[in-house]
Every structure is written in structure tokens, then in C-alpha cells.
Image (spheres, helix red, strand yellow):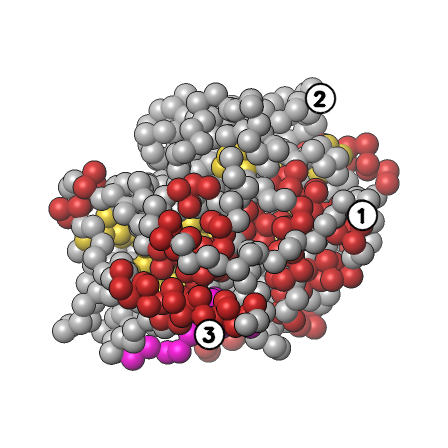
Amino acid sequence: MSHRGSSLAIRATLVSLFVLLGLIAVPTMASAHVERPSYWPDPKADCTVKPCAGGKVPKARSLRSALDESRRGETRVVCKRDSLKRVKASVQRARKHGYDIRPTDHRTLSAKKARALLQINKRLFKRCGYRYIQEAVTASGNNDRVVVMPGLYRERKSRSQPTYDKSCQKYLTPSDSGDPGALSHDYQIHCPNDANLVAVIGRGPDTGPVPAPRDDRHGIPNVGSCIRCNLQLEGSGVSADDVIIEAGNAAKGNGGPSAAGHKKDVGIFVDRADGFVLRNVNVRHAREHDIYVIETDGYLLDRFKAYYAGGYGVLTFVGDHGVVQNCDVAGHGDSGLYPGSGADSTTDKRYKRFYPKPRFSQVFRKCDSHHNTGGFSGTNSHGTLITKNNFYDNALGYTTDVFTAPGHPGFPQDGNVIADNNFYDNNFNPYQPGSDVDPFIPAPVGTGLWLAGGNANQVVNNRFYDNWRRGVMLFAVPDATVCGPPPVGSSTPVPGCDPAAVSTSFDNRFHGNTMGVSPSGKVQPNGLDFWWDSFPGNTGNCWWDNTAAPGASVTTSPLFLPNCSNGTQPGSSIGVGDVVNEGELVACLAGFEISGYPDGNEDTCSWTTTPTKPSSARTGTDKAMAGGQAAELEAVCANGLSPRLCRAFPSLALLLSLKLPPAVTEPTTTAVKPVASTGTLSSFTCSWWRQADAAQRLGMVQRIRHFATMPIDGPTPYGFGAGMPDARATKLFNSRCSTAYAGSFALYKLYGAAAAFSAVGQ
């Protein structure tokens, strides 16, 4: 019998075995970026400037006040020759048809407000002194503001600045992974337009040398003084549509493809600019992120739009006292909204010297995030309130994860509240030929929300409907960390790190959610409402008071989810294991393939295919797929991988007796001499992999392994990130990069998810 024939026979046997065991079957990724070593800012206000900067969310100043010369700070006006003409046309359209803050928020413009806005813009036009936004920002100081009149701003001077300028190399700093090419804060001061179309640098040079990355990331070391704190950057039009900041091809309008004609990595970059306000602008087509805020205490992003970046629409990283609101984000290769490594300010494990009382460090509200690979994502996202948003027409509506924990302070993710949002119709498939979105990550098409390894999150009073695969998924990431430094199994373990422990997927609460019913009352079922891996030993995960359509029941896998006596006894919830559900995760994430996922073999994983639209009568599980996934899980365990995962399932001993055929021999890399490649890890995709030779591939695999197995920062000693043998990683990339749609996948993100589910034994 052929190898494939024997595998199919084994899968058939496994299916029968699962039926005999009475296992429940289920019906038929967003991650992170790589940056300089980053730190949470001190949340206390900086009162060396008046008024104080940071310490709270800043308030936006009215457009009219920009004309008041008695106000603190200077106003600089940027305009185009046709700005007044554009204002008049926009006002006329708004008077006749109204205007959109976001697709689900349409507003009207009264005659009184129209007259006032025209008068303000006429006066602003007389004061216009700049044609380029960057020049006005650079000329500004603390408490100043830059008003941008309607127009298309390509920022020609910024575009003309070289990328990776050799004269700036002296400001490079080692990243968390040890790569020497990260852009330091001083680099951004001296070369602001190397990577950025518009750069807002809020503080001066560091007061001392950049130290080696610290384990404790609270407090920016050697931070410079405020030079552009309390800066407000705003458009003066009717809506964000009137001021376009174009990082790519303006001929594409607000459409795709992602990063179309990109000239810079970032549209608007905000670095340590405490008290920053951005309003009423549209940013498009950046190579990585349209708007990027880093190490900033106190920021407000309001009434803006961000379209078709290669990575994120909005990226905030290690920030505090932030609000993102009234926005429209669409067309992004990774996700529309991304608060990465937010300040850990909510749970009992918070850093109480900085956060003595629990509070949200960031708020995302009243935004529409749609037609992205992911609507919302955030590696090690903390203390964030996500409320009154609409996540729709994405592949995956919402995700937080711990897949790439090294380099992202605050492992594990915890303490987010997701309340009063709508998650619907997240069935967009960016993996199909002709998609206008280039997916940066693989994601389970048809899913409203997943929590991949998060703790103490609350999902409450939301609506999940018309998500054809699942409404909500929760699962542990069992081998996200290991206790010995690389190579795994070292005799010098991290003190306090328990190699048998799992530190992800605890104490999450799901209650008061409405499943399968739209706000109008229309019945639009999800493929399945709630899915849980029930990882053995996970505690405190509770589901209660969630409702379905009249006459229907909430659908779940496993069949019964703990309600913890309506949430009053979380200790009663203990994961007992679900081999079928865990098999799906391994088949779709581990990268150890019998089937060759995602090469179109739907016997083991269908995440990148569009699910069938569910009817009000739910369909059952594809048992053949469940059997194939079980075979993948068995193969992982039989090859000594994913030790925590496999130890958690004693029943796998029965599966081992089935004597699977030996694993396919892995390619050797010992005869190849690795060649290093420079550039940020996020720039190396499957397209690069396809063109690289064996030496370049091995060099990249070793570089990613070094990054993935770095120490993980957290309130307790968590150890090191999980890694894989170089030959296995090479096999992973060869497989995952073989499909046409995978060209834009980031290699390090594929590695992070796979290593967590196929880590080497420890």
C-alpha cells in the first residue's frame, strides 16, 4: 500500500475510533510586527511643559480655536492651491447628500455649520504657509498644531528621501532579536522620512546610550525632553475624505490592492509624542502601516480613515492613555486595528507601581473595521476596551494572540474587555485569486472572534451573526514558552519557570452575547456559536446568559460549556481535553503536514476556504476531516513534538498503538552554509522565500529561530519562546509558501504560530 493509501486507512480507523470513544465533533491569523526594543512610558504626566503632557487622554482643540492667537501654541497651516475650491465642493456635497464618518455613521451638515466651516477655511487659507505636512510638523514645537486644508498630499519631499540611508546607519540599534538594523528613536529624529511619509517625533535625543533590552519594560530608559508634545494634527474639511495623505498610488483612490504603489513604510509615524491628537484625515497605501504610534503616553486618533496598507491600518505599540474612535479602516493585509503590547493596567497582575488602580490603557470605539484579513488584532494586547465597533467583511473579525511573544512586552495577553460590538459577515476570503487584499497572515475565514492564548478577557453584550465558520473561538497556545534557553532542554532553566505549566487561556468570560441574530432581529446564524479547545488544566473559562434566535439554542463545541453558576464560581471550570478540537489546531497551525496544508487538501484544514453559508438548521461535523486532523495530532506527538500538548492527552497512548507510518524524512541543512539577509523581519515574505536559494533560506530560518526563541517579558519568569529544528522550519515554509495566495505571508508569523503547536521536546 502507498504511503498516502496507508494514511487514508489510518484516518478512517481514527474516525471509527473517535465515534467509539464518543468524542464530540465540530462543524464544517493575525500576529505581530518587529521593532526596536520598546518600553511602556511612565504614565505620570510630564509637567516640564505647560500644560502637562501625557498622564491622560488629550482633548481635541476645536478647529475654530486654531484662529485664536491668544491660545497657547502656534498654528501652522498647510494647503494646496485648490484647497478652497475643494472645501466649497465638499460643503455643497455634504449639504445635499450628507457625509460619512464611517459606513455605519452617516451625518448631515446644517446650513449654519456649513457657513461657519467655510469662513474658518477662508481665514486659514490666508494664513497658509506650507505646502508639505512634514515641513509644518518639523517646524512645530510643544503645544503647537498643524492644520491641513483639503487636498491630496503625496509629500513629494518625503518621498524623495532615501530609504536605509547610509548616512543614518550610525543611529541603528540592535532589535530584541539581536539584529543590528532596528531604527532607534535617535534614528527617527535624524532621518524622519527614511521610512515615514510624515513623522511626528515628540521627544529629543536619548540622554544616554541605548541600553541592552531590559527584562522589565516599564519606563523608557534615558528618555529625552519633550520637543513636540501636545501636538495636534488635523484636517480642516467636512470629513476625513477631504484631506488625503497618500503613501502610494493616488490613482487607486480608497481602493486596493494593499500597499498599492507604496513609497514609504508608514503613512503617519508618531514616536514618543505625548498628548498627540490626530483628526479628520485619510491615510492610504503605506507599505506596512498607515498610522503608527509607539511609546506614547496620551494620544487621541479621531474621525480618521485608513485604507489598504500592507500590514495595519492603525498600529499602536507599548502605549498608554490612548483612544481610537470614529474611524473607518479597510483593505489591510494584516488587520485594520492593532493595539500591540498595551500597558498591563487592568488585572491583579498589573505593574502596580505604574498602575496602582485598575484602568484601561487604551480604548477603541465607534469604528468600522471591514474588508481586511483581520478586523482587529494584537499580540500581547493588554488593558484595552473595545466597544461599540462594527467588525464585518473580514476573514477573521477579532484576534489577540501570543504566537510571537518575544519582542512584544507583556506575555501573556490579558485583561481586554470586548463589549457592545457587532461581529458579522466575516466571510471575506483574501486567499482567492484576484483579491484586492494581500493577506499578511493565514486566518480561519468565516470567524467572528478568537482568543489565541489570552487570559482574563471579557466578551460581553456583543452580537455575533452570519459568520459562516464560527462566532467565537477560545484556545490555549500550549508551547508558546519553554523553560530552557535554546537549544531547548538546556540544563540552565529560567528560575520560577515551570516546564509543565501552561500560562495561556485562563479566566475568560463570555456572557450576555446574542448569537445568530442581527440588530434588526433577522435570524442569521453562525456556522457554530462557541468553540473551545478545552485544554486540560485550563481553569476559569465561563459561558453564561448567551442567547440565540427565538426557538433556537446556542451551538457549541464541546457540546456543553461550563457556565460556572452564571459566572459566580469560575473555579468550577476545568478543561478536560478535546482531541478533535485540538487536532484541528495542530492540523492548521503546526506545520507538520501529512496533508500538506494549506496546499488545497481540505481533508485536514479548510481555514483558507470559504465555508458554506449556514441555514437555520445547523449541519454536523465532517467526520473525515476530524479523522484527518486527529492523524495530524498523532503525527506531532509520535515525532516527539509539542510536549505540553501531547502530555495533556493520555488517551493518545491508544492512538499510538495504531502504528502510524514513519514520518517523512526531513531535508538536511548541514551541507548548506547560511547566508544572512538584512532588513526588518516583516519584509521577508513567502514571495522572498520562493526566490531565495538554499543558503539564503537557511540564513533566514536561523534568524527567525533566534528571534522566536528569545526571552519572553512578563510579570513572572516565563522563559523563552518556542522554536523548531531548522530542517522542520524549512519544510514548513516550503509547504506554506507553495500556494499562489501565500506570497504576502510574513515568514516569522508563520513560524510563531507553528512553533507553539509543534515545539521540540523539553
Q: In this view, does 414 lie to the left or right of 495?
A: left
x, y percent for residue 9: 45, 70
Give the residue at x 86% y 38%: 167
Q: Do the residues labelled 2 and 3 touch (CB within 8 Å)?
A: no
**Disc 2 versus disc 3: nearer the observer:** 3
x, y percent for residue 152: 68, 64
Q: Is residue 567 left or right of residue 533?
A: left
Q: Does the magenta stretch include residue 612?
A: yes
Which badge, 1 or 2, comes first in the chain's sequence? 2
Residue 748 visible in the shown view: yes
x, y percent for residue 257: 64, 70
| Residue corresponding to mark 3 | 610
Secondary structure beneath label 1: loop
Which badge, 1 or 3, comes first in the chain's sequence? 3
**Disc 1 versus disc 3: nearer the observer:** 1
Q: Work out whether residue 604 or residue 110 is closer to the camera in this orientation and state it.
A: 604
Q: In this view, does 698 lie to the left or right of 452?
A: right
Q: What's the residue type where badge 3 is placed?
A: Thr
What kind of secondary structure does the magenta stretch mostly adopt? loop
Give the residue at x 38% y 67%: 13
Which residues lie in the magenta part?
Answer: 600-616
**Disc 1 versus disc 2: nearer the observer:** 1
Secondary structure beneath label 2: loop
Estimate the spatial distance between the alpha carbons at disc 1 and disc 2, rounded to whole Å: 38 Å
Q: Work out whether residue 459 or residue 179 is closer to the camera in this orientation and state it.
A: 179
| Residue corresponding to mark 2 | 209
Give the residue at x 43% y 41%: 644
Estimate the spatial distance between the alpha carbons at disc 2 and disc 3, rounded to whole Å: 51 Å
Q: What's the residue type where badge 2 is placed?
A: Pro
